[in-house]
Image (tube, rainbow, N blue to C red):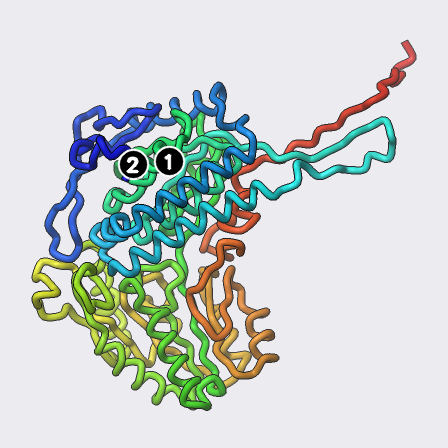
Amino acid sequence: MANRTDTRTERAHRTIHAGGEWLAASSGATREILDPADALPFAVVAEGDEKDTDLAVAAARRAFDAGEWPRTPVAARAALLRRVADLLVRDREELGLLESRDAGKTVEEGRVDIDCVADAFRYFADLVAGEAPGRVVDAGSPDVHSVVVHEPVGVCAMITPWNYPLLQASWKIAPALAAGNTFVVKPSEITPLTTVALIGLLVEAGLPTGVANIVTGPGHTVGARLAEHPDVDLVSFTGGLTSGTKVARAAAATVKKVALELGGKNPNVVFADACETEEGFDTAVDQALNAAFIHSGQVCSAGGRLIVEESVRERFVAELARRARRIRLGRGTEDGVECGPLVSAQQRAKTEDFVASALAEGAELRCGGKRPEPSPQRPEGGYFYEPTVLDHCHREMRVVREEVFGPVLTVETFRTEDEAVALANDTEYGLAGAVWTADAGRARRVAGRLRHGTVWINDFHPYLPQAEWGGFGKSGVGRELGPAGLAEYRESKHVYQNLAPKPVRWFAG
């Protein structure tokens, strides 16, 4: 890991990084980080507040206004991002394990996350290094040179969620650095550890002092201050709708750039023709399980709404429930475990409330719906909840309308293509969705009609660093990944150069 002589133990309580120094909270406050598999503390971090946030923003402001990074040649910035990717690969096992213990996911999921983080750094390094220096605009005169160039936005505030701590941070940090910005990142207060580690890797890779800053602490103090801070030029937030609207309101007072990646209520539409062969049926069921239950459903793009054609509903749901019962729950670091706990007691209680309300409104429980029995792989104090399938659901149910962020799959049915599209689009959100069909024409038609930022056809959950990630409706504004993700962290400037200036003579005098 970064700064091997400055180990995580030696840095205990000093998880705020501002102006090149690792600091404790100015108030001295700390927070215990709990392992969601047993609810026992395994790390301690600084609990920063507004004062610590102001210190970090001031450091980022100095580094942008007077530092070297915004003026560092593109090739050198790209080279640093590639060094960071190499360090992530070097520390893959340690970081994957840390992500597992912090967020509750399996170690294998943690390793995959680290691979994706490294890919993101390499992608944005290649993207910025391969760009043209500017776009020439024809001014209609040989005496005028007119060009549109890109410049960094300035000081970027990044507020990241607890479900994919390092991955979501990388989607913001990598393009921001590639564009020449400085930043302050606030990870979720319950899963901050890998983001703290990433700052160490950035320092080890040679990032200049003050460019990368982190404040560990709660959203209502650190996050709120970042959103309203007059010296912050851009705020990028990933999280829930309620918090996202607060960020937008706070940022409006200073008219800063805002990017919001919020919630989702994502439809997984299965047509009967996708299930005509045994292989097709098996694949669609398998992917429906993955869509709903990866990371215990704690994914913004989770396919928590299964919308299946009525003629295959019973067979499909019966097999889905049978397999869901066989998912092996346990501590993510245990061999053979396929699904870990929810991230917190609060998140499990929220999931339980959603299931109870669904049953009260007439849903049929096909599997799950309760806490599992403790076992050697599932300590009694852990926040485990069984994968749950709720059949005979409809749009008026709260569990169908609102984001659960837990291992809960609802089932709705349709008879016609138009009805399938209407159900899939009947949501306030518009983040992602999927279509399963053997008919290529239908696949294109339905995908084109779905009002969701990402649409998968005969698949669920893959993403490409080169593509754009964003949504419609209340799923947010702005884009991450791809060229648009880099554009979020830039301003455009039109440089107009008159090579042969002459008097204008607008006025007679």
In this view, 381 is above or below 73: below
SS at mark 2 in the image: loop
Residue 175 visible (yes or no): yes
Residue identified by numbered label 2: 2
Q: Say which quarter of the image contains residue 80.
A: top left
In this view, 228 is above or below 351: above
Percent across and percent down for residue 176 are: 48, 38
Q: Tell me the crowding category of disc 1: few under 14, some 14 to 19, or many 20 or more residues within 10 angstroms, Cα based.
A: many
Percent across and percent down for residue 376 are: 8, 66
> Is 328 in front, or is 157?
328
In this view, 167 is above or below 255: below
Please state, as top left, top right, bottom left or bottom right, where the C terminus lies in the image. Answer: top right
Q: Say which quarter of the image contains residue 6.
A: top left
For residue 361, the mark is none
Toward the top, the furthest residue is 509
Residue 221 visible (yes or no): no
**Residue 9 placement, left or right of 94:** left
Percent across and percent down for residue 354 are: 26, 65
Percent across and percent down for residue 150 are: 61, 35
Measuring 51% from the left and 57% from the top, which residue is drawn there? 472
Residue identified by numbered label 1: 202
